[in-house]
Amino acid sequence: MNEVKDPSKTRVVVGMSGGVDSSVAAYLLKKQGYDVIGIFMKNWDDTDENGVCTATEDYEDVIKVCNQIGIPYYAVNFEKQYWDKVFSYFLEEYKAGRTPNPDVMCNKEIKFKAFLEHALKLGADYLATGHYARVEQTEDGVKMLRGVDHNKDQTYFLNQLSQEQLSHVMFPIGDLEKPRVREIAEEAGLATAKKKDSTGICFIGERNFKEFLSQYLPAQPGNMETFDGKVMGKHDGLMYYTLGQRHGLGIGGDGEPWFVVGKDLERNVLLVGQSFHNDLLYSTSLTAVKTSFTTNRTFDKNFSCTAKFRYRQTDVPVDVTLLDNGDWSVTFSEPTRAITPGQSVVLYDGDECIGGGTIDEVFKNGEKLTYVG
Amino acid sequence: MNEIYLDHAATSPMHPQVIQVMTEVMSEVFGNPSSIHQLGRHARKYLDDARHVIATSIQAKDNEIIFTGGGSEADNLAIRGTAYAKKAQGRHIITTAIEHHAVLHPCEQLETEGFEVTYLPVNEQGVVSVADVEQALREDTILVTIMAGNNEVGSIQPIAEIGALLTEHQATFHTDAVQAFGLEKINVDELKVDLLSASAHKLNGPKGVGFLYQREQTPLQPLILGGEQERKRRAGTENIPGIVGLAKAVEIAQATMDEKRIQLKKYQQIIVDTFTASGIHFKVNGQVENGLPHVLNISFAGMDVESFLVNLDMAGVAVSSGSACTAGSIDPSHVLVAMFGKDSAELRNSIRFSFGYGLTDDTVAEAAKRTVDIVQRLANV
């Protein structure tokens, strides 16, 4: 556990995105008397044909806010690391027919690794971000807790952080509700108080996902078929679809709406089925790879907790078995819809996010579902 | 901690005498030099006197000086103004890979408009070869634009030799002397340049004012149209306080050039000696001996410039590296790329120290010491 130092002697680097959350994070730390430095991270160059780059505009906002708060600001470029560690993985996963989560990877490899190292080189004691999550110092180490605003909680994306990383982390807005964060920004007159929240994956932003992906991966159109082999239409390329997806299939006709229920990579066929609660979408257990715990606690080989399989989903009670090779087997208390390989499975003990892994294989009553990707 | 400013090549503090004369002019001389009344004539006198000081400093005639809104505007006017004025004679331009962006970007823009640009390489000292210029010259070359002294590494280009080479050629010869002016003796007839750009704020003058020297008879199409100021070559009511400030800065620079050069070279030496004595691993990029006296570009083995610069700032040492990119982070310097190649370590570990007015031996030594401390500390992180 870190020694408690006088705030004025504690240097905190705040990762500033130009959004309201990290602006308020920096503002609150400064008010508490910390030695605060704002740093903007540039991970992606999205300069368009008109020379407009959202990174430039975001950095302008960082400058305004830092000058308002009265803290120094700098920028750092991790484009190369981001490409090597996050974007390459993102493309590889899509090629393999899975649905990756680049934000989880970005937190693990860039924000709380390359950026944290950068902060430490600047003599920082802590790295702070505007994530909706909390860290709690305890005698057994640092606990990562859900953000107080459960609707905004971002621990799902932070599940790969280690004790070592968490020991250097502060989440100043984790105990606030989002509306209160906006309120503080407005009360302080911060330039980003009314700025729209960014949506989607950072490097794609508001752009069309299909168009973006097609610049990097060749699209191979093929057939859409039912499980019985009935051709229902054409798809634009398997990578554009994810399990449980309804929109963009273009299958008309009577009856219940159609959903993606699987992918046959070998035949380049998108499997579709009718009804939201289509039985084919349900599974009962999964195996997870690239697992890690946020905590120092040791766990029995078998233990119970709750889990999330997607961001902004309510927890599901699960039984976890730690396999000898480090993978996990996670069994759900009841059949669960659209468990998607490539996404994270994140484990919780009450409010504490204890760790997570990447969903690899999915099973129904012990039988592997080969069609989910 | 007191801030030590070693970034004089980026901009420099104004000399107190410059501030004094400018405030006097601002409070007393508000007339428009083009007006026919007494107040206008009063302002006109200041303008003419300033023009004469500047012309004399480079052995030019008064009517060969065009005041501009700074060095970048002077470069733009020289390059685009020449290209548009001479496009009937040819569309080929020669420059180097290490020019300031105020030269490179207008050249790139002209390429999209049907001009052809040759970007000459430089050697590891950052110097272009006269033979390369000669080889690149074509019958349809209309402009050769090569900087006098480089802003990032301080290398001095063989301007007089290139000028001599071009005397029998139709090409206009422009030099961007923004860094060299005021620190190197410049005689436009000895250098045989047709156009020369300079800026006030690099030599303890105000920001937002500079000039372009235009040899008589050199074709030039104005970029800013309007009134008939500057003999129709640059419209807009003259910035009298700025121009007077520029002239005062030039006057001081000319009068103190020799002693200033000795002092600046001493600062370079203090830095190099302190680093050598400390045992840190470093290497000077470019030449110390024959380069600009106020610029010292140093590569630090194993350092990473992004955290290095921030650490220096936090330790109160203001320096720079390359040029800040659009989002504030560091883009690899195109000058170092030209000198060492695009994958060289120098791109990631080089810092520019630049010296000027207000420094003392002690403050420079203190900055060197703080730098050594940071290098030694980061080596252990």
Image (tube, grey):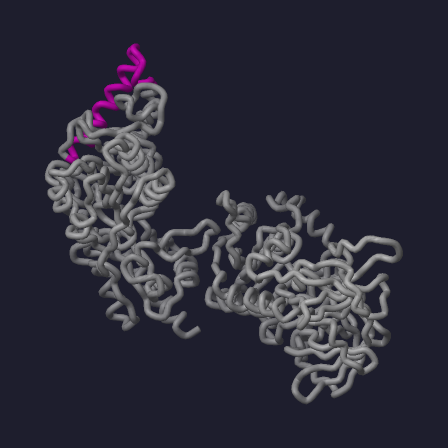
Using the image as rendered, state which of residue A146 and residue B365 is in the foreground.
Answer: A146
Q: How many marks?
A: 0
Q: Residue at x 31, y 64 (%)?
A: B299
Residue B56 forms part of the magenta stretch? yes
Percent x, y for residue A115? 52, 65
Q: Residue at x 22, y 27 (%)?
A: B51
Residue segment shown in magenta: B31-58
Is the residue A113 above or below the residue B352 in the image?
below
Using the image as rendered, state which of residue B257 and residue A333 is in the foreground.
Answer: A333
Q: Is residue A123 left or right of residue B102?
A: right
Quadrant location of the N terminus of chain B in the rendered image: bottom left
- Chief SS of the magenta region: helix
Q: Residue at x 78, y 58 (%)?
A: A246
Task: Give the image quarter of residue A34.
Answer: bottom right
Quadrant location of the C terminus of chain B in the rendered image: bottom left
Percent x, y for residue B111? 35, 42
Percent x, y for residue B238? 32, 24
As drawn, the residue found furthest toward the right would be A255
As drawn, the residue found furthest toward the front would be A230
